[in-house]
Image (cartoon, helix red, strand yellow):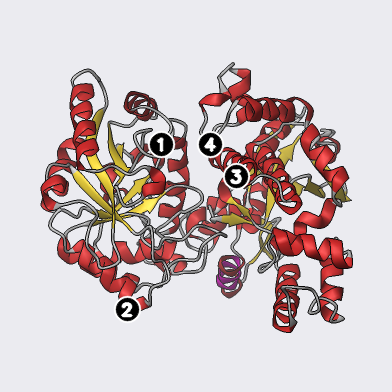
Amino acid sequence: MPIHNADIALVFEEIADRLEIQGANPFRIRAYRNAARTLAELPQEARVLLERGEDLTRLPGIGEDLAAKIREIVDTGHCSLLDRLRRELPPAVTELLRIPGLGPKRVKALYHDIEVQTVEQLYRAARDGRIRALPGFGEKTERNILQAVETHVSQSRRFKLAVAAQYAEALTAFLKAVPGVKRVTVAGSFRRMRETVGDLDILVTAAAGSPVMQRFTGYDEVAEVLSAGTTRASVVLKSGLQVDLRVVGPESYGAALHYFTGSKAHNIAIRRIAQKLGLKINEYGVFRGDERIAGEDESSVYKSVGLPFIPPELREDRGEIEAAHAGRLPKLVELADLRGDLHAHTRATDGHDSLRDMALAAKAMGLEYLAITEHSRHLTVAHGLDPLRLARQCEEIDRLNGELEGITLLKGIEVDILEDGSLDLPDEVLSRLDLVIGAVHSKFHLSRAKQTERILRAMDHPHFSMLAHPSGRLIDEREPYDVDMLRIIRHARGRGCFLELNAHPERLDLLDSHCLMAKEEGVLVSINSDAHSRYDFINLRYGVGQARRGWLEKHDVLNTRSLVALRPLLKRTM
């Protein structure tokens, strides 16, 4: 069974959870949590790195012991340490940590004092009033736990896009190798590049007699077969991700792809248009009476209702059908349009590779320029640069630019926006750089008015070039801070500065709706990787997907410009 980075990260997270419940050494717990984050954010599969003979101890937070455990998991699918820890505590007890308000100490008390081992047992204990009597709990806490459990149970699990991609790409490659299979396409929200994915919908065309259904349900990663027939099957992978497979005929392929890509609202709107024309659209084709008149490809489906092809990322019933009718569909930006990346870190702060390594990796991605934008001194956890260290890095960039061919490094900084809107480094230092990216890294819970004014004051700074990850959100981990994004976008237009679309799969920030807002206001967006290692530039594809969901075209994106065209735009903000 192929082991993915997400699988290894889950093993390390569970080890950390179990150690924490047991009261183990905090440094040991933190090491596993840091390793889990490293694996979760690593775009390259660890198993591929091992196959290449690469040294995993070069990865951040991975020492000899953790590297050995990664190899053990990749080779065997198990971790002996986790197996031992599971024997010491019930298997389901770590699920209790997913309930808001329950930390390791409370989980330990629930387990030892009233033998709560599962979420269901927790619910019954709270409902029956048995939790309030425990030390450190009380009636209010018990009531909050009950509400949190009800919310937790009602929410369906969703996977971040980059995590879903690990499973989708491996399964697609597996299915393409099955005899008789001709086409394999992942549809659904994954194809629409939604930031999170609830399940995977896979369409296959295959020759008669192909064993694709048997191979699919027998795939090594399948934990449970929900249903299996001659043309459709549903399984749940060991990761918990549900996958639905449908085998369709070539004459229906386009109709099925349209139907299962969605969104539901978009499909309903298209069917209504078809009904007015006396047509019926379903997963098998476009029909006039009993006659199939279209459906072999998606373009034929749209053409049957008088529309041009609408890209999957736009199919959310947010004006794309009206735009298609009027001939105003955007020509969406593509990954190949990017000429550079304007946000990256090296090991000078919290990155993991040298300037040279980052430059060469960017060049290998086909980029012509790369801005090095380390953190500033206020972000001590990232070993941010003070003026002296920044000056030394600028000198090193100048030396390296004299040696490199085919890639140019730009001198920048990701400077902290302080609570009062001032920047973390003095004007005299910032004026020497090619660009200054401002970022909020603290005080996330200011009021809407204060947070907005803080950012607007920072943008008024004469050397401010770009606002990094503008909403500050981390998907499923931290909500966006409360700001008036329209005011910020209009202020950026007035100042002539730019907004970042941070392509890191944990962020994907700007939101797609804010990308569209920036486009409408004439503010350029920069699709940046926020790379912290030479592997991270591959994440630009997720940023491009988010940009496409936000209707952005090549001319709406700052870093589609050549370096010659870019420099005057950056100077305009300095």
Tell me, yes or no, whether the highlighted magenta stretch contains residue 478.
no
Left/right placement of residue 324 relative to residue 20 reads left
What residue is rendered at 33% in x and 71% in y?
Answer: 451
CA separation in Å, label 2 and label 3: 36 Å
State which tag comes first along the sequence, 4 or 1: 4
Residue 454 at x, y percent in the picture: 27, 69
Callout 1: 10 Å neighbours few (<14), some, many (20+)?
many
Image coordinates of residue 203 in percent, x first then y, are 69, 46
Which part of the image, by quadrant, shows the N terminus? top right
Between marks 4 and 1 in the image, the one whose residue lies nearer the viewer? 1
Q: Nearer the viewer, mark 2 or mark 3?
A: 3
Q: Which residue is mark 1?
A: 351
Q: Which residue is mark 4?
A: 43
Question: Which one is in front, 424 or 394?
Answer: 424
Nearer the observer: mark 3 or 1; the answer is 3
Q: CA distance from mark 3 to mark 4?
A: 22 Å
Query: In the image, which residues are magenta?
Result: 267-273
Upstream in sequence: badge 1 or badge 2:
1
Q: Earlier in the sequence, mark 3 or mark 4?
A: 3
Residue at left 81%, top 56%? 93
Q: CA distance from mark 3 to mark 1?
A: 18 Å
Residue denoted by label 2: 449
Query: How far separated are the C-alphas under marks 2 and 4?
Result: 37 Å
Looking at the image, residue 4 lies above or below residue 501: above
Position in image of residue 139 (x %, y %): 74, 83
Residue shown at 85% from the left, 68% from the top: 120
Q: Is residue 27 left or right of residue 134?
A: left
